[in-house]
Amino acid sequence: DAGVIQSPRHEVTEMGQEVTLRCKPISGHNSLFWYRQTMMRGLELLIYFNNNVPIDDSGMPEDRFSAKMPNASFSTLKIQPSEPRDSAVYFCASIRDRGSAGANVLTFGAGSRLTVL
Amino acid sequence: AQTVTQSQPEMSVQEAETVTLSCTYDTSENNYYLFWYKQPPSRQMILVIRQEAYKQQNATENRFSVNFQKAAKSFSLKISDSQLGDTAMYFCAFTSLRGGAQKLVFGQGTRLTINP
């Protein structure tokens, strides 16, 4: 298995531009998570999906952020318009969630480093 | 809400020494899991070890072991015979199974440097 695949690895853009980050989860995994990592705030959960349905988006910082999961093998995180404070590493992670039956291991992608100038 | 606290922002030891990273957490749940993840300079998040709260026995993976104290809500990671490749950020994480969903809550991380 190729693991969780994220693109792009690096993105540099100017303030006000639209940014789209992409994620392909591991085949067979039914839950997908988007995390943001910054020096100041550490790893923050932005949103997660279960069976392609957004379950909890309480971590999404504001309306400029949106996420979709149109099918089991693809998700996007979009920032429009982007601002310098959005600069961070964005991680996608997936898991075969067994619910209360037990915890599997969350597998992370390599992350997308976003720099907004 | 659950919280995870790592009180050591940075640590540094000599190669082959043993080092212990601290982690405490706060939860009212009884059924949960705890994890240690490693993030080397490549920034890839790698699972080091995990512990199920209902298991008394401390988890062990080769040179990595944990000291899980459920009553104290403490979950420390011990790295024995440390190697240069252990240099990384280490994150403690918690997930409850309540509600049937796994959401990892992370601590702020400890930057560990192994010196030759």
Image (cartoon, coloured by chain):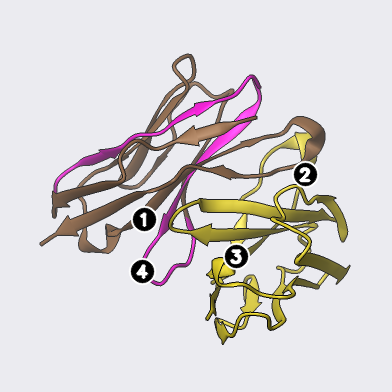
Assess whether mark 1 and mark 4 are in contact (beta carbons under 8 angstroms): no
Residue B49 spot, x, y in % from top left: 46, 45
For the N terminus of chain B, the quadrant is top right
Which residue bears the numbered disc 2?
A98
Distance from the alpha carbon under mark 4 to that under mark 1: 8 Å
| Circles 1 and 3 on the same subunit | no
Q: Does residue B15 appear anywhere in the picture?
A: yes
Please give left or right for residue A9 compared with residue B65 in the image. right
Q: Indicate the chain on which mark 1 is placed.
A: B
Position of B82 relative to A28 (above/below): above
Which portion, as a residue range, is magenta? B17-46
Please name the color used to draw chain A: yellow
Q: Residue at x 68, y 80 (%)?
A: A16
Distance from the alpha carbon under mark 3 to that under mark 4: 15 Å
Which residue bears the numbered disc 3?
A91
Distance from the alpha carbon under mark 2 to that under mark 3: 22 Å
Please name the color used to draw chain B: brown
Assess whether mark 3 and mark 1 are in contact (beta carbons under 8 angstroms): no
